[in-house]
């Protein structure tokens, strides 16, 4: 529940990147022994990943550092009950094939924001010498002898690049991944693997070159996960929609350039210094045009949040989604709050104005964030249902929002009246 209409002000520290932590946790399978990771976000998805590793036979401990013991791999399967909750589970395919020579991974299928097939994963791994059959909704893979190869991806898929990269580090010879994804999370994965002894060049470019090595060993020092650029961008949008002044700390400003440029186009003041980025809104929001693209273009994971910004702009904005076919589901819920949004295929035409409080329902992780932003901007009491999506990608969102002055709280079914809402959020008053 959100009692909105107040500017957010202050500083907020950004947690570690979910999209970097998950593949790095899974990559520990490549090097038998104990691994230590720092800045791992406390999220439902990281818990699910550690649970999956535990089912494979690799226990973990959480604390200041996350410790994963991959000395023994007892099983080589990622079953459907895990994959359906967290699509990143498919990333065990490459490491298990490289280490064990076999793997069984449930097909991930579709999700709310669209189908995300793994054909590019299989194509690249087949080039390295893997063989696959699909049976009973599972991918069964065998790898007798991984060999380096030239892999040409049809599109710069992030998880596809990661899966092939993780298998290639233990393949004989040289692998080149062409049209590789360039996201900072892939650079972080490559840096982690190099800390284990992998030989990788070109991370952050469209061509990765991997010289296979016979074995990898755990690093002597903990690897620190990079900051979450999507969480950071969400807080910057919170300043924009509430007319506030928010500084995000513990970030890499270079990862936020596309987001900052769009907020500047919308009329916000942007200041970057060291490991901080500050956004202030001192006047009306202006309309803008946005098209999602692979990195370094505008990230699809921030499209929903910028749509909320557009609903408050003084004019008409256009947002085009090119990555996922169903990633405009939040538009219908924003319309419940008074937004004027037209949908034409993968494009949303947003006629800016005002938002009013309402009960809305989240369809996915980033849609949840967009609706929370709308609730923070709209005067009155907004109820966001199905907030479990938020726990997959935002660590302590409620606590952090309260420190910025938001009146927000989680309430049970029996606490959905205004008086109890105020009581639940009294600490933020």
Image (cartoon, rainbow, N blue to C red):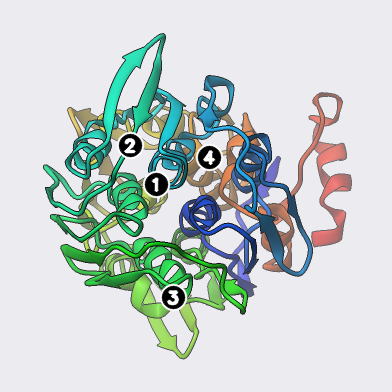
Q: Earlier in the sequence, mark 2 or mark 4?
A: 2
Q: Earlier in the sequence, mark 2 or mark 3?
A: 2
Tell me the SS state at disc 2. Answer: loop
- Where's the N terminus, which quadrant? top right
Determine the residue positioned at 45% across, 47% down: 99
Q: Earlier in the sequence, mark 1 or mark 2?
A: 1
Residue 377 in the image, given as x and y percentages of width and height: 54, 52
The reply to whether callout 1 and callout 2 are in contact (CB within 8 Å) is yes
Determine the residue positioned at 52% across, 54% down: 18
275 relative to 370, above or below: below
In the foreground, 203 or 165: 165
Numbered circle sitting on residue 282: 3
In the image, taking residue 355 as reference, residue 324 lies left or right, namely left
Residue 429 in sight in this render = no
The reply to whether callout 4 and callout 1 are in contact (CB within 8 Å) is no
Label 1 or label 3, whichever lies nearer to me, is: 1
In the foreground, 60 or 274: 60
Which residue is labeled 2 in the image?
Answer: 143
- CA–CA distance in space, label 2 to label 4: 40 Å
The reply to whether callout 1 and callout 3 are in contact (CB within 8 Å) is no
Label 4 or label 3, whichever lies nearer to me, is: 4
- CA–CA distance in space, label 1 to label 2: 7 Å
Disc 1 crowd, CA 10 A, few/some/many (<14, 14-19, 20+)? many
Label 2 or label 3, whichever lies nearer to me, is: 2
Q: Earlier in the sequence, mark 4 or mark 3?
A: 3
Which residue is labeled 1 in the image?
Answer: 98
- CA–CA distance in space, label 4 to label 3: 26 Å
């Amino acid at each position: 529940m959100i009692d909105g209409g107040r500017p957010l002000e202050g500083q907020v520290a950004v947690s570690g990147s979910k999209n970097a932590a998950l593949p790095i946790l899974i990559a520990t399978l490549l090097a038998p022994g104990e691994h230590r990771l720092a800045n791992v976000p406390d999220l439902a998805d990281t818990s699910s990943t550690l649970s999956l590793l535990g089912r494979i036979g690799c226990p973990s401990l959480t604390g200041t550092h996350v410790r994963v013991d991959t000395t023994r791999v007892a099983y080589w399967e990622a079953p459907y009950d895990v994959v359906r909750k967290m699509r990143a589970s498919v990333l065990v395919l490459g490491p298990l094939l490289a280490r064990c020579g076999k793997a069984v991974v449930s097909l991930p299928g579709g999700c709310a924001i669209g189908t995300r097939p793994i054909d590019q994963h299989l194509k690249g791994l087949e080039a390295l010498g893997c063989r696959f059959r699909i049976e009973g909704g599972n991918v069964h893979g065998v790898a007798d002898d991984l060999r380096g190869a030239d892999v040409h991806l049809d599109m710069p898929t992030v998880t596809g690049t990661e899966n092939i990269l993780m298998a290639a580090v233990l393949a004989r010879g040289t692998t080149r991944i062409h049209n590789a994804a360039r996201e900072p999370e892939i650079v972080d994965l490559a840096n982690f693997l190099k800390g284990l002894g992998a030989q990788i060049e070109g991370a952050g470019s469209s061509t990765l070159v991997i010289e296979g090595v016979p074995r990898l060993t755990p690093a002597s020092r903990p690897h620190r996960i990079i900051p979450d650029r999507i969480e950071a961008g969400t807080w910057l949008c919170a300043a924009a929609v509430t007319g506030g002044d928010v500084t995000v700390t513990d970030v890499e400003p270079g990862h936020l350039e596309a987001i900052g440029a769009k907020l500047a186009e919308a009329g916000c003041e942007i200041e970057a210094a060291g490991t901080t980025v500050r956004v202030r809104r001192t006047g009306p929001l202006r309309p803008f045009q946005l098209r999602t693209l692979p990195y370094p273009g505008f990230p699809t994971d921030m499209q929903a949040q910028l749509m909320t910004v557009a609903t408050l702009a003084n004019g008409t904005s256009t947002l085009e989604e090119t990555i996922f076919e169903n990633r405009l589901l939040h538009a219908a819920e924003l319309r419940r709050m008074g937004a004027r949004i037209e949908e034409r295929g993968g494009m949303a035409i947003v006629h800016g104005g005002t938002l009013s409080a309402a009960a809305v329902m989240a369809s996915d992780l980033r849609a949840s964030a967009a609706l929370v932003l709308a609730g923070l901007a709209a005067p009155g009491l907004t109820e966001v249902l199905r907030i479990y999506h938020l726990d997959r990608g935002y660590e302590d969102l409620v606590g952090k929002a309260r420190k910025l002055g938001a009146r927000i709280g989680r309430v049970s079914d029996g606490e959905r009246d205004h008086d109890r809402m105020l009581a639940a959020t009294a600490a933020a008053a």
